[in-house]
Amino acid sequence: MKFSKRWLEEMLGDSVELALLLERLTLAGLEVDGTESLEAIDKLVVGRVITVEPHPDADKLRVCQVDDGHETLQIVCGAPNVRAELRVAVAQIGCKLPGGLKIRKSKLRGVESHGMLCSTAELGLGNDHDGIMELAVDLQPGTPVAQVLAIPDTVVDIDLTPNRGDCFSLLGVAREVATFTRLPFDEPVVAACDADADHPFRAAVAAPEAAPVFTSRVIEGINPDAETPLWMIERLRRSGVRAIHPVVDITNYVMLEYGQPLHGYDLDKLAGNIDVRFASGDESLTLLDGKSITPDSDTLLITDESGAIGLAGIMGGESTSVTDGTRNIVFEAAFFAPAGMAGKARRYGMHTDASLRFERGVDPAGQVRAQERAAALLVAIAGGRCAPIQVVSAPEHVPARTPVTLRVARLEKVLGVAVDHTSVSEVFARLGFEFDVTEDGWSVEPPSFRFDISIEEDLIEEVARVYGYDRIPTIKAYSQTALVPSTESRISEERLRDAMSAIGYSESISYSFVDPDDHAALGLAPAGPELVNPISRELSVMRGTLLCGLLKAAAHNLARQRDSVRMFEFGHVFSDDGEPGKFAAVAVGRFYPEQWGEPGRAIDFFDIKSDLQRMLALSNADDEFTYESFVTESLHPGQAASVLRNGEPIGFIGALHPSVATRFEIDAPCFVFEVDADAAFSAKLSESAPISRFPQVRRDVAVLVDESVAAGDIVATARSAGGALLKAVRVFDVYQGKGIEPGLKSIALGLILLDSSRTLLDEDADRVVHKVIDSLLQIHGAKLRE
């Protein structure tokens, strides 16, 4: 929220040094995002245009005689709104404008010009280049423009946390500054406007639980030609609000000043009285921004006999909008329940200053004060006669401000320091809290504008921040540290992360919600639940696989000239059955870094399979893992496999299909795997055994099998047939080509034999080899290759 320092000081009734103000705001928890200094411009004064004559050699230029309070200046001007008796901002010779332009005596098409009549854009006060800035007609020529514009000034921009809705106003900020600077501060009292008009207009509330307080006031006979005064325009501009129309500007001004949103209706456009009710679900509404919507049945509407005329607390409707011809208006100021307002503006793609305040909660006791302030400003600016304020309220639905108990013992335990009881009472008094001192602490009743005070810890926070965080000493805490149980039955994520990092992978942490179209295109798992209120369409479903995020991250890196990307992620996926943990990886690009010692080649299927096998081997149960052919549209045919443990599927591995890779903007062969973390990384306990004193024996066997037979099946059969003496089976060659019949392939096995109690004889080794060959012949139709 932005505000003018001079405006704040006017409300405080005293000036505050800028550095002190920024420090106190920060200590109050109102983070200062930045400041903007507005400096006075020398030789910039109010001028009175005496005469305006056409330029002799230019149709669009005018030759003006201008009284600057000391002399009459001849100034050539091209603004279409320049006219006699207009009060303007005159930049005299030697004036340096904010854009760096220095005013000098000059000739424009042969006519001398001794200054410049300035627009708001040229003074750095806006973007309007179409005409010169018009000042109030009662200003005396020669008055410094800085004095008229209340300059110098500083615009302060603060960032508010959601719980401090009371500080979305100058009044709320002033309370905080007064509290932290010990300045005396009295709540502003607004004099009641004379109610000398009588009008039959009435308002009704059909949903009091959503609108416990609703006030309305008719003001008749305002001057449609009235204009918003410059001082108000400037205060609005410095608060980030653009001036539109006196009625609209006043509602914005009071909202910024007191934190109470208001809305103005053109009384002559209303069809009967106003009723506040929930939408029927099938009615349409065109809003002030021209957008047409069909409000849901849980949305609160402002209606008249013609139907919906506004979204309550968010935006008014176009049909009753205030225009330049408006003469009679109705001001609305209400308290809408924060729970009913939450998320409504966002649902319809809007975010307004009013909805921001209503969602966080406005003061339910501030509506009449805001009405009186708005009426007083409008009558002063545009005239008119005020009718009495009508109040429709349902006290049983207004938030009750129940006392909150603060115990001395609890305060000292949480803060870690004893705070003098008198100081605590002083804090509550400075904050404007009503309180009673009790036997063991305080009973505090927070004011109506402090929605965030409801439990004991809220009061402790208030004491801490007002007493001063810097006055609370740092105390080193000591505690006994319990040893965390360590298990050997599961491979820890830390060990797996270290292992993946050691072989060149980087960890990725991606969003749990993904683009449903990307997820469907990947097709490797059903998408999780759809979000009710997503951030965007591209992040609207919970992920059913980690690969969506990994592939996006890989594409992001490849687009930035990374020639090799290897990434992994641990995380949960989401389905109707729960949130299982998964472990996934993606590899794409070069296998080796670019170098002279090895020929360059791309990562292939066996590289990523080798990486997965290294991780699975940490479980001490690598003989339990097998691979089977896996067919899916998302993975490349012939380069995809299911990962099984003891015959049960636990994941998959493969090359991403080119069509899927293209969707993710990856134009190189890309390899992925994903396994269930619990199933893959449960570990077998290690068993120690003495190293055999006897030598091992190796026998090599080559067999011919059908090319469809997997090498893994050959190894499994050999292990089963070899018995206790067969310690390992290694595939050291697979060959197809010259000398091998078409449709067959040669697989060469290294059989490692060992007996830890004796030296094996040739007869022992031959017996095992014959058993292996016989099993391969019977089960796989293998032939011994000579």
Image: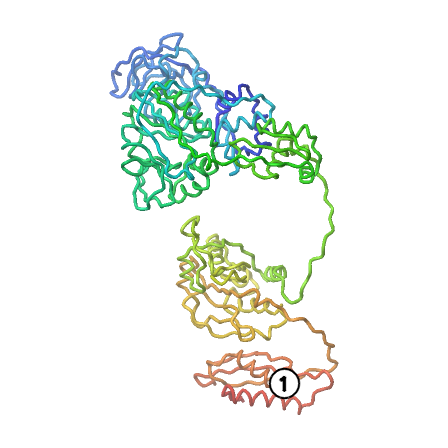
The answer to which quarter of the image holds residue 425 is top right
The answer to which quarter of the image holds residue 377 is top left
745 and 648: which is toward the camera: 648
319 and 304: which is toward the camera: 304
Q: Residue furthest top?
A: 70
Left or right of 488, for residue 7:
left
How many numbered marks appear? 1
Pick the quarter of the image with the C terminus: bottom right
Question: What x and y, as percent, mark residue 335?
Answer: 43, 34
Colour scheme of the picture: rainbow
Assess disc 1: are there few (<14), some (14-19) or many (≥20) residues with their C-alpha within 10 Å of its C-alpha. few
The answer to which quarter of the image holds residue 714 is bottom right
Q: Is mark 1 on a helix, strand or loop?
A: helix
Tell me if residue 38 can be seen: yes
117 and 321: which is toward the camera: 321
Residue lying at 71% horizontally and 34% vertically, measured from the top left: 418
Q: Which residue lies furthest to the bottom in this view?
A: 763
Q: Name the residue under label 1.
A: 723
Tell me if residue 78 can be seen: no
Above or below, 337 against 170 in this view is below
Above or below, 202 against 301 in this view is above
Question: What x and y, as percent, mark residue 542?
Answer: 46, 56
Amino acid found under the numbered disc labelled 1:
Gly
Question: What x and y, as percent, mark residue 323?
Answer: 29, 28
Question: What x and y, as percent, mark residue 140?
Answer: 39, 10
Residue lying at 46% horizontally and 81% vertically, measured from the top left: 707
